[in-house]
Image (cartoon, rainbow, N blue to C red):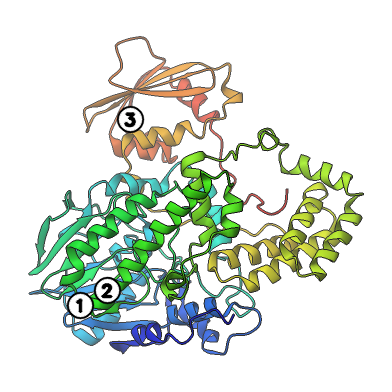
């Protein structure tokens, strides 16, 4: 790994700058005594990097493991290393304004407690949600139950609801692999997630925002703390904002600029992000704020100090996204496919030699594929790829052509001995999908995945490989039960509530069913009709008068309760209640523990 810039020690200095105190022990429990965060389990990262880890990723994990309270500049503090994200605290006239209160209530409360232990019992006088990922709002009830200004960007509510969105079950399942939730924290297992160490597993909460930031240049003052905002919609997460604390000359960058390559298309699944928007936003950030800030801090990692350092940091990240987008398109227009571009596209030396542009959470090949998908979709233009068999059927045929499962394993051993782990994995994947009972193939593929994981610089790649090996060796790796957030469910827009029913409908079972239900939401003054026909459930707001099977008059809260199985107490109805019972009987449940690396 001689290409790594180990001569650059600035990150190590910056990650320790302003240290006040750590949480000791670094273990946080919920009210039942269950551990929801264990920072001490990463103590092994203080040892020298072993052969089972990439030196760059080991370094990144070690820096992320530095937990505690840090003074960023006078009156601005961060608690780092107590969750996947950071919690920032800005002292005001009478209390403290909290920015991004972590994933879970317990961790946010512990972070606030650590701050108060060293800065006094200042009340929380305001909260800022920088964007709508759960690691930036889920712990809010650990710092406040409401009654203070809560600021968020325009569109926050809609996208926060999408955390409980259509593909949530699949994303949650795949997150077991990308975040290594089932792996032991050790030099052989999970050593971080790139953006931080891991996500806590405590209670998720939600308090709706009371102040919406609707435009760039908008200023708000909370408890004497002045903030000047920049909306960055579409960069990273659609509703996101950066802001300057002019009184502190401190620039908060949310999640758009971190100490690694962020991801245009997360491996656990998400909508493809547009790097052009990211570039426009970062250019505006540089123009608007770079000369007015002596420190830049963010929702992940550690700050960068000095006006010149801030400008270089922002410029490097902007140029990274520009280069990856434009060069991918240049090669697309020369006829190269996503995999061909990902294999051959180099970074400029200045970006290659910067720690903050290396791929610890996102990766260059992911970005290339994301850009390709955004412009051209999944199809590479080759008709051989237009109508392929699904994985198991393809595998059966490949294995037959290669002479059977035993022959495939022997071919794979040959490639493995040559150091070609990637093709060995492809061959063995066919052997396993053709015959999941082929123990020799499973064991050898687990070995290949383990070696690929131990060599990966990217944290999510490492976690995926090692969790895949775990599934091959021990069977299905159960998902950590997704923490439910009643506050957020209660805040879902009505259309999303009905969408959540429609995507659970078992279409084939509903082919021959037809029914119509009117839902009068008495507290909102709205009327919605759901109509089932041809296996499709269609919602219409304010439908024309017409016959229906059932009419329900209920509040929005009763609607949520009814769909969550809490009964229909207090709901007025007219017509045949059997229509609702028939609809419920046609709903399908998601599979929370589907296999990923086996058929």
Residue 139 in which image quadrant: bottom left
Up/down of 535 relative to 430, above or below: above
- Give the side of residue 280 with respect to residue 26, left or right: left
Marks 3/1: CA–CA distance = 58 Å
Q: Earlier in the sequence, mark 3 or mark 2?
A: 2
Look at mark 2 in the image and give the residue it sits on.
310
Structural crowding at the residue carrying mark 1, measured as other residues with C-alpha within 10 Å and reported as few (<14), some (14–19) or many (≥20): some
Task: Indicate the quadrant containing the N terminus: top left, top right, bottom left or bottom right.
Answer: bottom right
Tell me the residue that label 1 is attached to.
294
Q: Are marks 1 and 2 in contact (CB under 8 Å)?
A: yes
Q: Residue at x 34, y 47 (%)?
A: 159
**Left or right: 467, with 150 as reference point:** right
In the rendered image, residue 398, in percent from the top left (x then y), is placed at 82, 45
Reply above or below: 372 against 409. Answer: above
Is 290 positioned to the left or the right of 421 in the image?
Answer: left
Mark closer to the observer (3, 2): 2
Tell me if I can see residue 299 in this picture: no
Q: Earlier in the sequence, mark 3 or mark 1?
A: 1
Is disc 1 placed on a helix, strand or loop?
A: loop
Nearest to the eye among marks 3 and 1: give it: 1
> Which residue is drawn at the image coordinates 28% and 77% (left, top)?
309
* Residue 126 pos. (x, y %): 17, 65
Spatial CA span between label 1 and label 2: 7 Å
Q: Position of residue 455 (x, y in %)?
A: 64, 73
Residue hosting label 3:
571
User: Sequence-wise, which precedes: disc 1 or disc 2?
Assistant: 1
Q: Is residue 460 above or below residue 592?
A: below
Left or right of residue 93, residue 526 in this image: right
Q: Residues within 10 Å of mark 3 (few under 14, many from 20)?
A: few
Task: Pick whichever, 489 or 462, lies toward us.
Answer: 462
């Amino acid at each position: 790994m001689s290409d790594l810039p180990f001569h650059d020690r600035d990150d190590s200095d910056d990650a320790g700058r302003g240290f006040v105190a750590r949480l000791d022990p670094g273990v946080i429990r919920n009210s039942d005594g269950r551990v929801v965060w264990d920072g001490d389990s990463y103590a092994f990262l203080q040892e020298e990097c072993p052969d089972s880890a990439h030196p760059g990723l080991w370094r990144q994990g070690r820096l992320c493991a530095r937990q505690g309270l840090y003074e960023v500049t006078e009156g601005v503090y961060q608690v780092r290393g107590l969750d996947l994200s950071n919690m920032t605290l800005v002292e005001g006239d009478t209390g403290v304004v909290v920015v991004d209160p972590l994933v879970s209530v317990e961790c946010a409360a512990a972070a606030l407690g650590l701050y108060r232990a060293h800065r006094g019992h200042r009340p929380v006088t305001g909260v800022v949600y920088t964007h709508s990922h759960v690691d930036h709002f889920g712990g809010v009830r650990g710092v406040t139950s409401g009654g203070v200004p809560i600021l968020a960007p325009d569109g926050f509510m809609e996208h926060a609801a999408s955390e409980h969105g259509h593909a949530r079950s699949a994303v949650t399942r795949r997150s077991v692999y990308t975040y290594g939730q089932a792996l032991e924290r050790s030099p052989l297992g999970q050593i971080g997630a790139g953006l931080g160490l891991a996500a806590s597993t405590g209670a998720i909460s939600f308090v709706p925002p009371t102040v919406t930031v609707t435009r760039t240049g908008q200023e708000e003052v909370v408890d004497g703390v002045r903030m000047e905002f920049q909306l960055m919609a579409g960069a990273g997460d659609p509703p996101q904002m950066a802001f300057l604390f002019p009184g502190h000359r401190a620039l908060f960058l949310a999640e758009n600029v971190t100490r690694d390559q962020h991801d245009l298309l997360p491996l656990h699944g998400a909508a493809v992000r547009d790097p052009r928007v990211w570039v426009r936003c970062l250019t505006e950030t540089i123009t608007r704020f770079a000369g007015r800030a002596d420190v830049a801090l963010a929702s992940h990692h550690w700050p960068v100090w000095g006006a010149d350092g801030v400008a270089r940091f922002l410029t490097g990240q902007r140029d990274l996204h520009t280069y990856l987008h434009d060069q991918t398109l240049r090669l697309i227009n020369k006829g190269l496919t996503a995999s061909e571009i990902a294999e051959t596209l180099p970074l400029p030396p200045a970006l290659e030699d910067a720690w903050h542009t290396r791929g610890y959470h996102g990766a260059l090949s992911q970005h290339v594929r994301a850009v390709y998908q955004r412009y051209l979709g999944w199809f590479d233009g080759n008709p051989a790829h237009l109508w392929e068999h699904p994985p198991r059927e393809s595998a059966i045929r490949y294995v037959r052509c290669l002479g059977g499962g035993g022959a495939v394993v022997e071919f794979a051993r040959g490639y493995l001995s040559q150091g070609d782990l990637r093709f060995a994995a492809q061959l063995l994947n066919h052997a396993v999908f053709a015959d999941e009972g082929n123990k020799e193939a499973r064991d050898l593929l687990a070995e290949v995945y383990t070696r690929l994981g131990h060599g990966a610089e990217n944290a999510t790649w490492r976690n995926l490989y090692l969790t895949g090996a775990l599934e091959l060796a021990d069977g299905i790796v159960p998902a950590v039960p997704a923490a439910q957030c009643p506050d957020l469910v209660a805040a879902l827009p009505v259309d999303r509530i009905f969408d959540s029913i429609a995507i659970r409908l078992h279409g084939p079972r509903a082919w021959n069913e037809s029914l119509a239900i009117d839902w009068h939401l008495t507290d909102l003054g709205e009327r919605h009709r759901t109509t089932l026909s041809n296996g499709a459930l269609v919602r219409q707001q304010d439908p024309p008068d017409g016959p229906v099977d059932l009419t329900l008059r209920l509040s929005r809260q009763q609607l949520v309760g009814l769909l969550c199985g809490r009964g229909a107490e207090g709901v007025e109805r007219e017509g045949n209640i059997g229509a609702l019972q028939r609809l419920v009987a046609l709903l399908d449940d998601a599979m929370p523990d589907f296999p990923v690396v086996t058929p």
